[in-house]
Amino acid sequence: MMVLWQSFVELVHELMPWYDGSIATILIILIKAIALVMPLMLVVAYFTYAERKVIGYMQLRIGPNRVGPKGWLQPIADALKLMTKEIIFPTKANIYLFLLAPILAIAPAIAVWAVIPFDEGIYVANLDISLLYVLAIGSIGVYGIILAGWASNSKYPLLGALRSASLLVSYEIVIGFALVTVVMIAGSVNLNDIVMAQKGGILHWYWIPLFPMMIIFFISALVETNRAPFDVVEGESEIVGGTHVEYSGMTFAVFFLAEYANMILMAVLAVIMFFGGWHSPFEGIPFMESMFAWVPGIIWLLAKTTFFMFLYLWIRATFPRFRYDQIMRLSWKVFLPWTIAWIFVVALMTQLKIGPWF
Amino acid sequence: MIDNIKKLVKDFSLSELRGGMKITAKELINKKITVQYPEEKTPISPRFRGLHALRRYPNGEERCIACKLCEAVCPANAITIESEMRDDGTRRTTQYDIDLFKCIFCGFCEEACPVDAIVETQIFEYAFVGSRDGNDNTKGQFGSIITKDQLLEVGDKNEKMITQTKLEDAKYK
């Protein structure tokens, strides 16, 4: 144990010679990060299983049921398969960029989780500008996709990358504006403060005053994460598999992980911004409050997040893919004017103190 | 004017999207229609035309009399028959090959046979192993050409099933 600690101290001094703070702090941050990332990866793995099961059920099939009881071991079998597969490099691809792309995709997808508050005081980092951090780091993920499209030296990945870049640019704005309304009401860009501002039961959450923004945010989140019905970046029927065409084995798996981590992040973000984060929906209701007082906040957060994750699958099973230009029109001609208009409405109402919520 | 407002309300309440999602939500809890194939099987009609078999009379004598009607009627030329006179003076086949890659499973051979010797059974789960004409006959599997011995073996093994399905189908012939 001592030897391990010694080598850890040496490693920290080696990697960060300028650091003169406590070594224990770094260890605690490291443990926190691992405690966050490990369950996240597990959730991602079982989210793929849930996706196949739910979509199967909605199509009157039963989904995977062969590996383990009721197919419970399917994600583990998938992971093993992907890990043992060969990584194929296209002949004239730039191998360094080709390998950098999945890393650039997954690093922001995981880094964003640092500021997500799971309960009162449960987070890895409490930034004052955590919402800004989420939007900024979240946007970096697109470089991974663009780089993957470019480095593959192949036409379908390049088309996918082009689509991805233009979609993200369009919908980033919409998401930004939709979240600005929340920030205006809460008066803070700290995710903790935003959740605290929604204290007091289901009627105090922001989904009621900002209902249209909630819908717009969720639809834009579908586009941001390249989910059906906006999955033109992959578009199996048009461009085979988009940016993933040339990727195999673990490199593909990393893209997959990043995509699903982003999906879960968007679900959590929707809960934090519009559905009261870790707050119980029964706060302020006489008997229900005391009845559900024993439930820890993290359970409420995860339950609400699970609902939004299910909504992703539900929507994917229901709607056919949008045409590319229709998605663009939806962004620039429908969502953007509406969000801007709503910003003015919210601004007026908050300034003049109109309405029950502002 | 009124219609426009109606359409606007309909569009902005996402009513069509909600309608679609209602259907998928209903299917989510509906009974599933999947058949778990290796364990469960769908029923097969007695008229089903699967793997061929050569039948025998109850006394063990093979039915086929080498009339070559099946060879003549076969639209895919999948059947090859050679025959000679046996010691007891009857005409019997020395070779009765069906190329299962050529065969289209039309059932004409069965229809043409005057002695009900060649039949098509309900067997459809079989595999081809070995070379095309090498007849690497391991574990009852074969190359694409199935020989007289193998056909008789299929018939011997499944005589009960063949009799039953032919009996069931006879009403409709």
Image: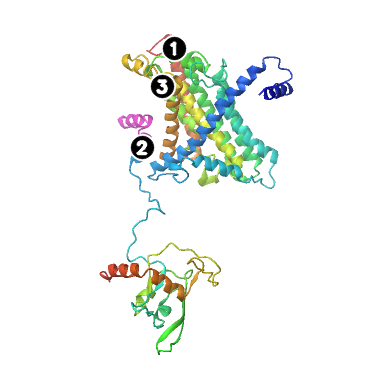
In the figure, is residue A72 to the left or right of A146?
left
x and y percentages locating residue A51 in the rendered image:
46, 38
Q: Are marks 2 and 3 in contact (CB under 8 Å)?
A: no
Q: Look at the magenta stretch and give its main secondary structure.
A: helix
Would residue A26 be counted in the magenta stretch? Answer: no
Left or right position of A73 against B73 = right
Where is residue B119? Give x, y as percent: 37, 72
Camera-nearest residue between A252 and A6? A6
Residue B64 appears anywhere in the view: yes
The chain holding disc 1 is A
Q: Residues within 10 Å of mark 2 (few under 14, many from 20)?
A: some
Q: Which residue is mark 2?
A: B25
Q: Looking at the image, which residue is at 35% across and 56% down?
A: B42
Inspect the image, locate mark 2, and give the three-letter code of the amino acid beneath it.
Answer: Ala
Q: Quadrant of the C terminus of chain B?
A: bottom left
Q: Using the image, determine if residue A216 lies above or below residue B116.
A: above
Q: Position of residue A91 (x, y in %)?
A: 69, 48
Which stretch is magenta? B1-20
- Residue B100, numbered label: none
Q: Which residue is mark 1?
A: A350
Which part of the image, by quadrant, shows the N terminus of chain B?
Answer: top left
Q: Is disc 3 on the same chain as disc 2?
A: no
Helix, strand or loop under label 2:
helix
The amino acid type found where label 3 is placed reads Trp
Identify residue type, mark 1.
Thr
In front: label 1 or label 3: 3
